[in-house]
Image (spheres, helix red, strand yellow):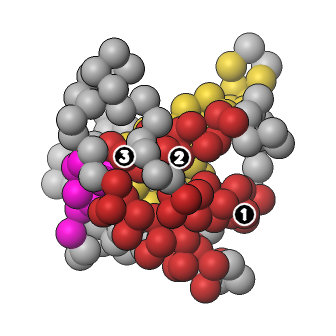
Amino acid sequence: MKLIASFSIDHTKIIPGIFISRVDNLDDKMITTYDVRVTKPNSEPAIDVAAMHTLEHIIATFLRNDPDWKDEVIYWGPMGCLTGFYLILKGNRAPKEIHDLLLKAFRSVDEAKTVPGAEEKNCGNYLMHNLPMAKWYAKKYADYLEANADNSLIFEYPKTERLVTDDGQQFFDS
């Protein structure tokens, strides 16, 4: 079975940042999937599950209500490895172009008094939320984005040598 592109990035070299994971052309319309990496894979602990769920709810609500971006947002959701999120937008913008949007989204978490949609009728696991921890992760990531706004490394997947496995499968850089 062919390895999918996102598993072909060397996760020992990824740092927190905003990266293009893939670009698709659907019915002559471009959509871009961004890897919004909040923690360093396999080095930092994964994000607490309940905090991740809370971040998903708050930031998805923020993105889908932002007057300048709401019509561009297709999806916001957590990575299975709990080190970040995927953001899918219409169009094809460079990661640096969505830096301010994500900075505002993560900063908005601090203003939340409650978790939107965290009721039994709105959520499949409404009891699994942790707003204080979500605020902690959001602040840490927002501070990082702000401090590294001019650091090109947070906008490009790390380049690595192309590796070939024993069975001939290639691992590609971005």
Above or below 116: residue 169 = below
Number of the front mark, 3 or 1: 3
Q: CA distance from mark 2 to mark 1?
A: 14 Å
Q: CA distance from mark 3 to mark 1?
A: 21 Å
* Residue that mark 3 sits on: 54
- Name the element at disc 1: helix
Which residue appears at 54% of the width and 79% of the height? 143
* Residue that mark 2 sits on: 59
Q: Residue furthest right?
A: 68
Q: Which residue type does callout 2 highlight?
A: Ile
Residue 139 coordinates in the image, percent (x, y): 47, 72
Residue span colored magenta: 45-52
Residue 6 coordinates in the image, percent (x, y): 41, 47
Q: Is residue 94 left or right of residue 82?
A: right
Q: Is residue 24 left or right of residue 119?
A: right
Residue 100 coordinates in the image, percent (x, y): 72, 63
Q: CA distance from mark 3 to mark 2?
A: 8 Å
Q: Which residue type does callout 3 highlight?
A: Thr
